[in-house]
């Protein structure tokens, strides 16, 4: 049910010796699927907290782990030039295996909550987070993934190694991908390669292209497109509702 009453809190997720800060938004009064929300390069900022809360109001227990916990605990940027420089620096310090372990730690935490349906877990990510959730879609626990304008999927993987696109055959759940066709950071040729890989390996997916730039879903960014953002949100709700709730 949409428009759920929610509660929010800051929590810490154990991941070996690391304790990951995370923002948790929960509907009240029931049992719900869980969703991991993965940030852009600007940390778990107001936009990411807002997305987390929006998901909770739609009837999901949503959690946003701070993926820069190792390099920059508590980092929160606001899309200005200085924050962007720092965010890119922290992004470049990440490694795919560590990021996957962080997502897995968020899943493990969700499963400790009595309000979470243990076998109904999804993920959504934006910008660098869109890349990370494409990676995380290879985790068996992730049943549904919404990947927004994930840069570098076709060309690299965090920390080095074969590009993340080469892991496409390992995706087991359903993946929805969202891209802007005028995005200067992700050439259309790379978008085409991602779509082709999903088709080639028969991944359950839908692919959405919007006449927008990078970050079109975020109302705090210059490329925000309210019409495309609203349409994409309906697609996100359809994905999670169908796969995680069986609607």
Image (cartoon, grey):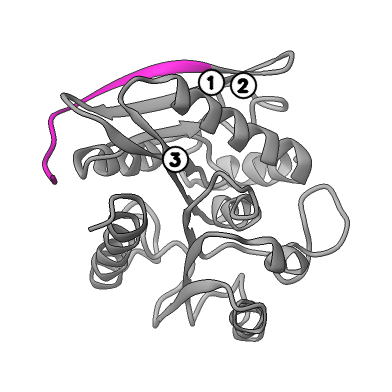
* Residue 171 lies in the magenta-colored region: no
Which residue occupies 35% across, 50% down?
A: 244
Mark 1 / mark 3, whichever is N-terminal: 1
Occupied quadrant, residue 235: bottom left
Q: Mark 1 points at which residue?
A: 21
Q: Residue 69's spot in the image, x, y percent?
A: 64, 25
Residue 214 versus residue 5 in the image, above or below: below
Q: In this rendering, which labeled residue sits more in front, label 1 or label 2?
A: 1
Label 1 close to label 2 by CB (< 8 Å): yes
Side (left or right) of 28 relative to 13 = left
Label 3 vs 2, first from the N-terminus: 2
Magenta extent:
1-12
* Residue 38 picture location, percent across and down: 51, 43
* Mark 1 closeness class: few <14, some 14–19, many ≥20 residues within 10 Å: many
Residue indicated by mark 3 = 119
- Residue in the foreground of this view, choosing between 145 and 87: 145
Label 2 Cα crowd, 10 Å radius (few <14 / some 14-19 / many 20+): some
For mark 3, give the secondary structure: strand
Distance of label 1 from label 2 (alpha carbons): 8 Å
Residue at 63% over, 80% down: 187
Q: Which residue is label 2 attached to?
A: 73
Does residue 153 appear to the left or right of 1 in the view shown?
right
Label 2, secondary structure: give it. loop
- Left or right: 111 with respect to 69? left
Give the number of the mark in front: 3 or 2.
3
């Amino acid at each position: 049910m949409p428009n759920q009453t929610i509660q929010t809190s800051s929590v810490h997720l154990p991941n070996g010796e690391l304790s990951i800060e995370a923002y948790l938004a929960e509907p009240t009064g029931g049992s719900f699927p869980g969703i991991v929300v993965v940030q852009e390069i600007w940390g778990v900022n107001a936009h990411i907290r807002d997305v987390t809360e929006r998901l909770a109001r739609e009837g999901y227990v949503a959690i946003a782990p701070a993926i820069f916990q190792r390099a920059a605990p508590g980092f929160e940027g606001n899309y200005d030039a200085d924050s962007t420089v720092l965010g890119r620096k922290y992004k470049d310090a990440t490694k795919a295996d560590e990021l996957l372990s962080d997502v897995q730690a968020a899943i493990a935490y969700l499963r400790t909550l009595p309000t979470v349906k243990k076998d109904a877990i999804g993920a959504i990510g934006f910008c660098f987070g869109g890349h990370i959730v494409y990676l995380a879609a290879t985790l068996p626990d992730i049943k549904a993934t919404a990947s927004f304008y994930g840069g570098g999927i076709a060309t690299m993987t965090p920390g080095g190694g074969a590009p993340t696109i080469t892991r496409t055959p390992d995706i087991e759940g359903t993946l929805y991908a969202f891209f802007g066709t005028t995005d200067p950071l992700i050439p259309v040729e790379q978008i085409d390669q991602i779509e082709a890989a999903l088709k080639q390996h028969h991944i359950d997916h839908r692919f959405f292209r919007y006449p927008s730039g990078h970050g079109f879903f975020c109302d705090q960014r210059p490329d925000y497109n309210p019409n495309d953002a609203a349409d994409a949100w309906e697609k996100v709700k359809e994905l999670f509702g169908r796969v995680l709730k069986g609607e």
